[in-house]
Amino acid sequence: MTIAGVMSGTSADGVDVAIVRIAPGKHVPKLKLLEHRAFSYPKALRNVVLAAMDAQSISAAEMARLHWRLGEVYADCIAQTLAASKLRASLVGVHGQTIYHQGAASPYLGKPLKCTWQLGEASCIAERLRIPVISDFRPADMAAGGHAAPLVPMLDYTVFAHAKRNRVLQNLGGIANLSAIPANTSADKLLAFDTGPANMVVDALMQRFFQKPYDRNGATAKRGIVLQPVLDTLMRDPYFVAAPPKSTGREQYGAAFVDKLLKLCGKARGEDIIATATALTAESIAHAYRTFVWPHLGMNAPLAAATDFIPAGGGAKNATLMRMLRERLEPLGITFVPIETFGLPAEAKEAAAFALLAWLTWHGLPGNVPSATGASRPVVLGRITDAR
């Protein structure tokens, strides 16, 4: 079955489309990436998406229009990818654009409540392409008591689990999240959670100081000096010490967090502030590894399995961030392995994950990993929209 997986992440920089061939396997499905294309959001659209994410109030009309406009954007991106590759897909899995995600319950109108919301009208895609579309993957897990995140661990286990080596899959999108897969284990034994911000804070600061959407190759951070007292203060954020399962997003590391960081930095140079924000990503990941991942993998035991660290997402292209991560993790005996070694480019991984989740849903199979999300049970994810 050939499936188009579509992802637009918390960085809100654009859309990734992965065309994936998936077939049943002996223990797990077999995946082959056939095509991947990345599309940038037009500037005006990105500005509206970012404004909606950080808005304290926004009109219902604006949200409705954005929801339908994103559906048309996703349909365009899929159509262009299929036409360019001369492939045909029989199913689409679209994540949508997260506008709000609250993985932990808080009181609302007299009742503790979790909620998550992804925009992008699936009917636009189904009608345009005449292909069944699976969307809204997160609510079913949340309704079963989970955080609705992370959902990529199902792909991580399917593609990367190994009999003799531990594998840590680190995604570096707007938010950083990891999947820790012990050697020779089942999917229900993996550990996965959001470690904190990845590119989100850096991107916001680059726009503010340098009018650029992101720090290309980490060049700006490379010119700066990490403000260690600021970093130490930021690392006292309660989220970093909270035990998994846990998830986070722009609600926690968006505009208000950036303002807090800037206040701590005072009159420091822009380059130093970017370096400090980049170091926050590296240090929060290293802290998560030492605190939660290391014991989960059994690394205190004799003859512990070797561990591969496999980064993906846009942050994997940030040389300064990768250097900071190596400085913190390689002394622990971790081997850095490029994700491309496995035939899956870093930029295509999350889109491919939603192709897999769509395949599972189409076949009535659970797509969440309760040990990662905290759900009470495995559940079938998503809603099917079929305009055929």
Image (cartoon, rainbow, N blue to C red):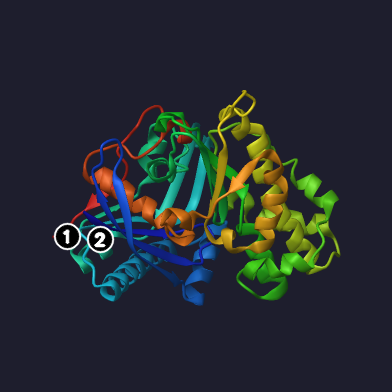
Tell me the element at label 1: loop
Q: Quadrant of residue 203?
A: bottom right
Q: Earlier in the sequence, mark 1 or mark 2?
A: 2
- Identified at 73% across, 65% down, the residue is 221
Q: Report x, y in % for residue 133.
A: 25, 56
Few, some or many residues within 10 Å of mark 1 (<14, 14–19, 20+): some
Q: Report x, y in % for residue 74.
A: 35, 66
Question: Is 177 rendered above or below residue 8?
Answer: above
- Identified at 59% across, 34% down, the residue is 293
Marks 1 and 2 close (CB-CB < 8 Å): yes
Q: In the rendered structure, find residue 62 and report the number of the disc placed on it.
A: none
Tell me the element at label 2: helix
Residue position for label 2: 123
- Identified at 57% across, 56% down, the residue is 56
Q: Quadrant of residue 11?
A: bottom right
Residue 126 in view here: yes
Query: Residue 21 or 216: which is nearer the viewer?
Result: 21
Question: Is 297 rendered above or below residue 168?
Answer: above
Residue position for label 1: 387
Q: Report x, y in % for residue 29.
A: 29, 43
Residue 57 in view here: no
Query: Residue 73 or 6: which is nearer the viewer?
Result: 6
Q: Amino acid at mark 2?
A: Ser
